[in-house]
Image (cartoon, rainbow, N blue to C red):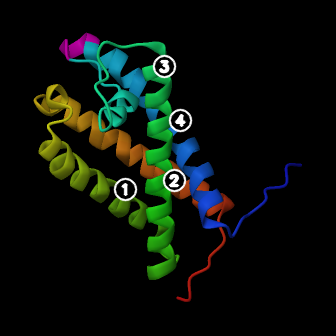
């Protein structure tokens, strides 16, 4: 029988949960891309490269940029998870799934609508409604995965 170790350390928990949720959601995004780019002849959406675009010009593509994009995406997943954990500690550990969706999708809306527009990042994705719907769905999947992982591995440290 597998013994699951729970942790009170928020940074470790956020790192583990964020990376696992990012791997799952980006894998689902990859398969959705294959299907929908074939059906709608749309631009292939690559979330790790879009995350890396915050820091440098990703084109022309190279192996080290792809690896750096994946690491950037994992880091962002960890930051989302840390924000979610602190929200739980502040507001209590009830309605975990709903809070996960609110924090993750709300943060995504802020960053995609605000920061990405301000920095003019990912313009080719923002021009296609299907891309926006896929990003929304992928962040919803990320939030759901994060909820399950935090519920499985996390310890309630809130005072509520």
Q: Dot 4, how many residues are within 10 Å of its Cα: few (below 14), some (14-19), or many (20+)?
A: some
Q: Secondary structure at mark 2?
A: helix
> Closer to us: mark 4 or mark 3?
3
Q: Quadrant of residue 73?
A: top left
- Range of magenta residues: 38-42
N-terminal label among 3 and 2: 3
Q: Is residue 40 magenta?
A: yes
Q: Position of residue 128 (x, y in %)?
A: 13, 28
Instruction: Name which of mark 1 and mark 3 comes first in the sequence.
Output: 3
Image location (x, y in percent) of residue 59: 29, 17
Q: Which residue is mark 1?
A: 104
Q: Residue at label 2?
A: 146
Label 3–label 2 contact, CB within 8 A: no
Residue contact between numbered discs 4 and 1, judged by CB atoms under 8 Å: no
Are dots 4 and 3 in contact, CB under 8 Å?
no
Q: Earlier in the sequence, mark 4 or mark 2?
A: 4
Residue 118, given in percent of the width and then of the height, sits at: 13, 46
Measured in 3D between alpha carbons, the distance from the residue under mark 1 to the one under mark 2, in whole angstroms, is: 9 Å
Q: Residues within 10 Å of mark 1 (few under 14, many from 20)?
A: many
């Amino acid at each position: 029988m597998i013994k699951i170790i729970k942790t009170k350390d928020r940074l470790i928990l956020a790192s583990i949960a964020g990376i696992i949720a990012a791997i799952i959601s980006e894998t689902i995004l990859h398969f959705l891309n294959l299907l929908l780019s074939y059906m709608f002849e749309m631009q292939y959406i690559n979330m790790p490269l879009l995350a890396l675009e915050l820091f440098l010009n990703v084109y022309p593509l190279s192996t080290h940029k792809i690896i750096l994009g994946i690491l950037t995406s994992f880091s962002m997943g960890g930051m989302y998870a840390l924000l979610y954990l602190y929200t739980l500690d502040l507001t209590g550990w009830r309605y975990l799934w709903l809070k996960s969706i609110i924090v993750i999708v709300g943060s995504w809306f802020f960053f995609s609508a605000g920061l990405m527009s301000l920095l003019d990042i990912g313009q080719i994705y923002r021009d296609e409604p299907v891309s926006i719907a896929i990003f929304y769905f992928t962040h919803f999947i990320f939030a759901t995965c994060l909820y399950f992982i935090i519920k499985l591995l996390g310890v309630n440290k809130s005072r509520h």
